Image (cartoon, rainbow, N blue to C red):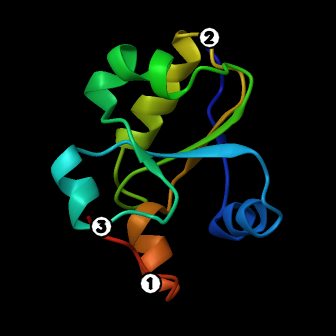
């Protein structure tokens, strides 16, 4: 099993500011995504990764940052494991998730 690698809010912001080519994935439910998510992220609920990842994340070597609700939420870690098992090679877990992002004053967007 591949070891889970983590990324901080500051590093995610740096990726965004530098316009790096990466995918930001919200691993929570579609309902949760609609209520609030990080700008620029796509929604792939953890239980639908096998179904949706091939279409939404076609490049298995692209940098992918996965997040969920907060430090105590395990959904992003499960999603990272699932993506690794599907052959994705560059997946990071942003453990702070939506709560960390919102508390920093950056804000979330809704649909």
Please tell me whether mark 2 sits on a helix, a strand or a loop.
Answer: loop
Can you say whether 63 is above or below 8 in the image? above
The foreground one among 43 and 78 is 43
Give the answer, above or below, for where 84 lies relative to 13: above
Where residue 37 appears, as percent x and y from the top left, is 37, 63
- Marks 1 and 2 sit apart, C-alpha to C-alpha, by 33 Å
Total labels drawn:
3
Gap between marks 2 and 3, in whole Å?
A: 29 Å
Q: Residue tagged by mark 1?
A: 103
Query: In the rendering, which numbered label is found on residue 87?
Result: 2
Q: Residue at x 62, y 32 (%)?
A: 4
Disc 2: CA contacts within 10 A as few (<14), some (14-19) or many (>=20): few
Which residue does the image show at 38% across and 52% down from the upper left? Answer: 68
Residue in the picture at 46% in, 20% down: 55
Q: Is residue 67 left or right of residue 24?
A: left
Estimate the x, y position of residue 62 in percent, counting from the top left. 72, 30
Dots 1 and 2: beta carbons under 8 Å? no
Whole-percent x, y for residue 107 in the image: 44, 81
- In the picture, measured across the screen, residue 33 lies left or right of residue 38, that is left
Identify the secondary structure beneath mark 1.
Answer: helix
Mark toward the viewer: 2 or 3: 3
Q: In screen coordinates, is 12 left or right of 100?
A: right
Between 84 and 74, which is closer to the camera in this rendering?
84
Q: Earlier in the sequence, mark 1 or mark 2?
A: 2
Q: Is residue 82 visible?
A: no
> Which of the 4 quarters of the picture holds residue 2?
top right
> Residue at horizontal 53%, vertical 11%?
85
Q: Residue 66: where, in percent of width, then height?
A: 52, 44
Which residue is farthest right? Answer: 18
Q: Which quadrant would residue 89 be assigned to in this image?
A: top right
Mark 1: few/some/many CA within 10 Å (<14, 14-19, 20+): few
Left or right side of 64 for 77: left
């Amino acid at each position: 099993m591949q070891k889970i690698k983590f990324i901080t809010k500051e590093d995610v912001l740096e990726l965004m500011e530098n316009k790096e080519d990466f995918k930001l994935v919200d691993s929570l439910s579609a309902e949760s995504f609609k209520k609030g998510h990080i700008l620029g992220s796509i929604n792939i609920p953890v239980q639908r990764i096998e179904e949706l990842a091939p279409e939404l994340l076609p490049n298995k070597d692209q940098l992918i940052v996965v997040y969920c609700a907060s430090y105590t939420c395990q959904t992003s870690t499960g999603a990272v494991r699932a993506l690794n098992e599907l052959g994705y090679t560059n997946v990071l877990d942003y453990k702070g998730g939506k709560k960390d992002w919102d508390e920093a004053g950056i804000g979330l967007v809704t649909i």
